[in-house]
Amino acid sequence: MAVEPLLSVRDLTVTFATDGGPVRAVDSLSFDVERGRTLGIVGESGSGKSVTSMAVMGLHTGADVSGSITMEGRELVGLAERDLNRLRGRKMAMIFQDPLSSLHPYYTVGEQIAEHHRVHFGSRRAASRRRAVEMLAEVGIPEPRRRAGEYPHRFSGGMRQRVMVAMALACEPDLLIADEPTTALDVTVQAQILELIARIQQERDLAVVLITHDLGVVARVAHDVLVMYGGRAAERAPVDVVFAAPAHPYTRGLLDSLPRLDDADDAPLRAIPGSPPSLLAPAPGCAFAPRCRRAASAGAEARQRCERVEPGPVAVAGHMVACHLPLGPDAAPCTPSSEATP
Ligand code: SF4
């Protein structure tokens, strides 16, 4: 029997009015997230992944949003701010890349978690403080009772991110959105925070949306992956399917860019040549075409199709892929080492 998704996004389009004209930051995006699963949304800067998460949370200030975002069947697009406020915290919560700017420097971390709990549950002061200490213990802060009385500047970057996870989960939401939660951390602490998110996700049967530019992060914790490019979905599939045989040339380029264990210490970084597309003046056809080696090496007719006709999503061997020439399992790398970035 099919599992009902907790979060369902259909044809989501987010447009910002700018001095240069409208910018469609997210275009016709659809995906589902089920309880107990983590969806990794991956893409370069400007791909629309963070705008998508802000739209789900109803934090897309100044943007025009169309399409549908439902949570347990309830439509969120067009919901009154007061109703969205009730959902934020209790049903869905978000953690950001920089915990220091999300924590208030004048209040102790315990007081900030407690206040969050009081606002959403109307709990009494003593109960909310107890809850704050419980949450700090749950996310692995040593001596949680003592540390609840300390200010954010007394915590390391990793510990501050644990505090943010504690605050996000204090009201027991069903959906956690983590926007680049480990980007500012060193690799050891990054691994600890990803482990924490994965553990809590399993223990609480949470639905998690993990926004990242790093496919390596996705490989560690996600069950499914959505690759975005130029505001649109390029590829969507279970994570093991994507890592075994990516179908979209852009995904393949991202995978080829990951450092390998057998790389020499002085090996140059491999990058996808070219730059992300302009969303202000999008060209016709596939947004990835100017950077796509697969299109470049195709025949003239196929190449023209890539340059003129925007590819729609099609199902290919367990993937949803938006490409006229999806890759097969034995495809050669799309970013040859001769184009490596020193
Ligand atoms: Fe490359 Fe064409 Fe596929 Fe776009 S549609 S990714 S240009 S092969």
Image (spheres, rainbow, N blue to C red):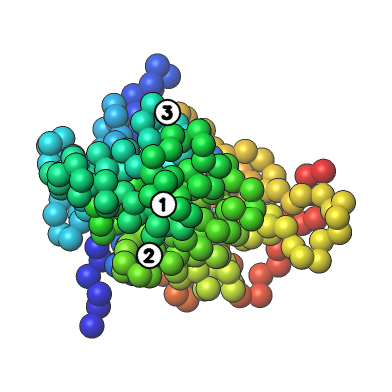
Residue 247 placement, left or right of 126: right
Secondary structure type for disc 3: loop
Q: Is residue 238 above or below residue 123?
A: below
Q: Nearer the viewer, mark 1 or mark 2?
A: 1
Whichever of callouts 1 and 3 sits on the residue coming sooner in the sequence is: 3
From the image, which quarter does the N terminus lie in? bottom left
Residue at x-position 43% and y-position 45%: 147
Residue 168 placement, left or right of 257: left
Whichever of callouts 1 and 2 sits on the residue coming sooner in the sequence is: 1
Tell me how far mark 1 sits from mark 2, CA to CA.
21 Å
Residue at x-position 50% and y-position 69%: 239
Q: Amino acid at mark 3?
A: Pro
Q: Nearer the viewer, mark 1 or mark 3?
A: 1
Q: Seen from this angle, which residue lies furthest bottom?
A: 1
Residue 4 placement (x, y as % from top left): 22, 70
Residue on which the image places disc 3? 105
Residue 296 placement, left or right of 62: right
Residue at x-position 41% and y-position 69%: 315
Q: Is residue 241 above or below residue 324?
A: below
Secondary structure type for disc 2: helix
Residue on which the image places disc 2? 201
Q: Amino acid at mark 1?
A: Pro
Residue 17 visible somewhere in the drawing: yes
Residue 117 placement (x, y as % from top left): 23, 45
Secondary structure type for disc 1: helix
